[in-house]
Image: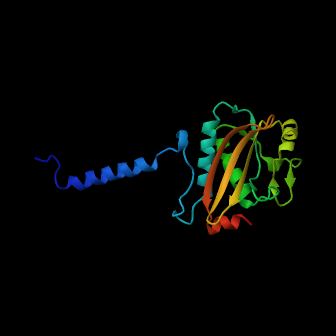
Amino acid sequence: MNALTPCARPTCAALLLALVVAGGCAAPGPQGYSLVSVPETSTPDIDPSLIAQQAADGMVLTLGEKLREREVILPASFVDESNLEKSSPLGRLLARQMASRFTQAGHSVVEITLRNEILLKKGAGQFVLSQEAKEIRKTHKVSAVLAGSYVTAKNRIFVNAQLIRTNDGVVLSSNDFSLPLTPNIRALLK
C-alpha cells in the first residue's frame, strides 16, 4: 500500500524537481570559486551592479589576509582594453560599485574624487598605470588599487577586475565576469 495520498504525490514531485534544479544552479566554478556571469537568455534589464557586487564579494573571499582591513584601497576607473587611456560611465560605475562592496566588507576605501591632486584625466576618469603605483603609495598612503578593464564583444562585455598591491604590483585578488550588452549598458559605454 502506498503511504502517500493522491493529493501529496504532485507536491512531492514538485519538491523533488525544485531540489534538482536548485542543486544545479548552486554549483561552484573551478576550484570552488563561484562563477559570476549572466546567461545571454536572461532579461534585458539586468542590473550591472548586482553582477559587480557578486564579483567584488568573490574577490573579498579570495583576498583573505593578504590585505588587512585598515590598509587603504584606491578604486580606479575601469578602462577600455582597446584603449587604456579611455574609460566610460560604465568603467567608472563598475569601479565604484565594486569599491562599495569592499567598504561593506570592512576595508578602508579612499574616495578619489575628493582628492584633486590625484591622476584625474579630463573626461576619462581615474587611471592607474604601473609606473604611477609607487607615487600613489607614497603620496596617498594607499596599499592597494582596485583596477580593471573591459572588452566589448557582439552581445557581451567581458570585465577583468584586480586588486593590485602598490608597493610591488602583485595581484592580491582578481575576478572575471561578463555583462549582457543591453541598451542600458550600451548607453553607459558612451
Q: Tell me which residue sits at (83%, 35%) in the image.
A: 141
Q: Position of residue 61 (x, y in %)?
A: 60, 38
Q: Is residue 156 left or right of residue 77?
A: left
Q: Is residue 49 left or right of residue 190?
A: left
Q: Position of residue 102 (x, y in %)?
A: 67, 42
- Viewer-side residue, 31 vs 47: 31
- Say if 11 sits above or below 173 in the image: below
- Say if 151 sits above or below 27 in the image: below
Looking at this rendering, what residue extends furthest in the bottom direction?
A: 183
Quadrant location, the C terminus = bottom right
**Colouring of the image:** rainbow
- Say if 79 sits above or below 34 in the image: below
Q: Which image quadrant for residue 46? A: bottom right
Q: Tell me which residue sits at (59%, 53%) in the image.
A: 50
Number of callouts: 0
- Say if 19 sits above or below 47 in the image: above
Q: Is residue 175 left or right of residue 24?
A: right
Q: Tell me which residue sits at (51%, 64%) in the image.
A: 41
Q: Position of residue 77 (x, y in %)?
A: 76, 52
Q: Position of residue 65 (x, y in %)?
A: 66, 30
